[in-house]
Image (spheres, rainbow, N blue to C red):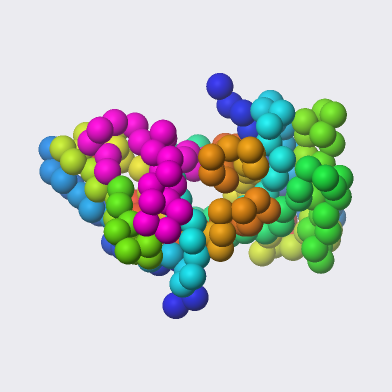
Amino acid sequence: DQQVKQNSPSLSVQEGRISILNCDYTNSMFDYFLWYKKYPAEGPTFLISISSIKDKNEDGRFTVFLNKSAKHLSLHIVPSQPGDSAVYFCAASAAAGANSKLTFGKGITLSVRP
Amino acid sequence: GAGVSQSPRYKVAKRGQDVALRCDPISGHVSLFWYQQALGQGPEFLTYFQNEAQLDKSGLPSDRFFAERPEGSVSTLKIQRTQQEDSAVYLCASSLTRGTNQPQHFGDGTRLSIL
């Protein structure tokens, strides 16, 4: 069963507008959440993270929101740029686990139209 | 280089052959992870090292998969008697410590194709 779900496989937005990428999780032990960006033939690149003690973390154009009661997080990109076109993975880990292994969603393909 | 380095980038092998995939983590990173990524899926955890100790190998799909990190730096993932279902991208990641709130940094992966 998928513990991290990215239910929308793709998203297309106009350059300059906001991109909102959603992620849901089922494991209540998860307490650290990350977003990775992936270009073809490259490995995932760390983008931004959030600890469960916060509900928002911002880094430049990227903001991640966490709603623990709904087990939902989202990544906002404002303004979107053509170079943001990539696959975005949501990932989660549990501090209480033996290691901080990441559980990933299936990814969302973001296309930013010029 | 400053990032995680993996080699080879591409590997083609015939079914039944053994393969070895190498990972050079970021210098000084204590934790090292291997993931397997099938087409259209997110990466899935295989195994974890803290320095030279393999603390979790629960994600290894069969006893044909073996990983080591003998000196706590470079790691090798070995797959014996490869099968077609082993075809995937194998990703290595490292992080500074075992502690929480440490992002993992990934290499570009090895794309393995079994014919």
- Residue at image point 54% right, 40% down: A98
Looking at the image, can residue A111 be seen? no
- Residue at image point 83% right, 55% down: A57
Front one among A17 and B49: B49
Horizontal arrangement in the rendering, residue A17 relative to residue B64 (left or right): right
The image shows residue B20 at horizontal and vertical percentages of: 23, 53
The image shows residue B81 at horizontal and vertical percentages of: 16, 37
Which residue occupies the extreme bottom position in the image?
B1
Looking at the image, can residue A90 be seen? yes
Which range is magenta?
Answer: B42-66
Horizontal arrangement in the rendering, residue A4 relative to residue A41 (left or right): right
Front one among A94 and A65: A94
Quarter of the image where one finds residue B32? bottom left
**Does B44 appear in magenta?**
yes
The image shows residue A110 at horizontal and vertical percentages of: 67, 49
Count up the numbered dots: 0
Q: Quadrant of the C terminus of chain B?
A: top left
B18 above or below B107?
Answer: above
Quarter of the image where one finds residue A59? bottom right
A108 above or below B10?
Answer: above
Front one among B27 and A77: B27
The image shows residue A72 at horizontal and vertical percentages of: 78, 34
Horizontal arrangement in the rendering, residue B36 relative to residue A34 (left or right): left
**Does B49 appear in magenta?**
yes
- Residue at image point 46% right, 72% down: B27
- Residue at image point 49% right, 75% down: B2
Horizontal arrangement in the rendering, residue B81 relative to residue B26 (left or right): left
Which residue occupies the extreme top position in the image?
A1
Quarter of the image where one finds residue B1? bottom left
